[in-house]
Image (cartoon, rainbow, N blue to C red):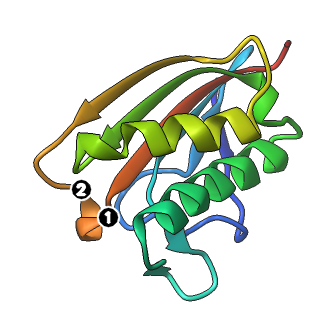
Amino acid sequence: MKKKISTDKAPAAIGPYSQGIETQDLIFLSGQIPLDPETMKLVDGDENQIRQVFKNVNALCEEAGLSLDHIVKLNVSLQDLSLFNSVNEIMKELFTEPFPARAALQVARLPLDSSIEVEAILSKSK
């Protein structure tokens, strides 16, 4: 059985997918890009895009009654791997030990030419 996770505090899906899906013990969040949910436009600047994408992820966590601390796995896609250190610094501000497992990849292109996309898997138990 699966339940849809949806909030207007994160960008609406721009395709045929759910913002998130809840199963028995896990929640899967679709890739979030740095869209401002009010304007549905990308925020300006790489650091702002990194911060916005995690705001969007956090909004979905909160909609599920959880927090960033419930994330057990992140997949981070970057158009330019030179942003890797910026992602690390911002994650140190937002996450606590133990940090989630993570993959970070450079990709050729992301939706709407954003600089970052993040997808997450959450466990309902910490």
Residue that badge 1 annotates: 114
Mark 2 and 1 residues: CB-CB less than 8 Å, in contact? Answer: yes
Q: Nearer the viewer, residue 70 or 80?
A: 80
> Which residue occupies 89% across, 40% down?
65
Q: Is residue 97 above or below residue 1?
A: above
**Residue 95 spot, x, y in % from top left:** 74, 31
Q: Is residue 1 left or right of residue 81?
A: right
Label 2: few (<14), some or many (≥20) within 10 Å? Answer: some
> Which residue occupies 26% across, 62% down?
111
Label 1: few (<14), some or many (≥20) within 10 Å? Answer: many
> Which residue occupies 74% across, 14% down?
25
Q: Is residue 66 left or right of residue 78?
A: right
Can residue 66 be seen from the camera position used here?
yes
**Residue 27 spot, x, y in % from top left:** 66, 28
Residue that badge 2 annotates: 110
Cα separation between marks 2 and 1: 6 Å
Which of the 4 quarters of the picture holds residue 61?
A: top right
Mark 2 falls on what kind of element? loop
Q: Nearer the viewer, residue 29 or 113?
A: 113
Quadrant where the N terminus sits is top right
Q: Is residue 96 above or below residue 68?
A: above
Which of the 4 quarters of the picture holds residue 75?
A: top left
Residue at far bottom of view = 39
Quadrant where the C terminus sits is top right
Amino acid type at image mark 2: Leu
Mark 1 falls on what kind of element? loop
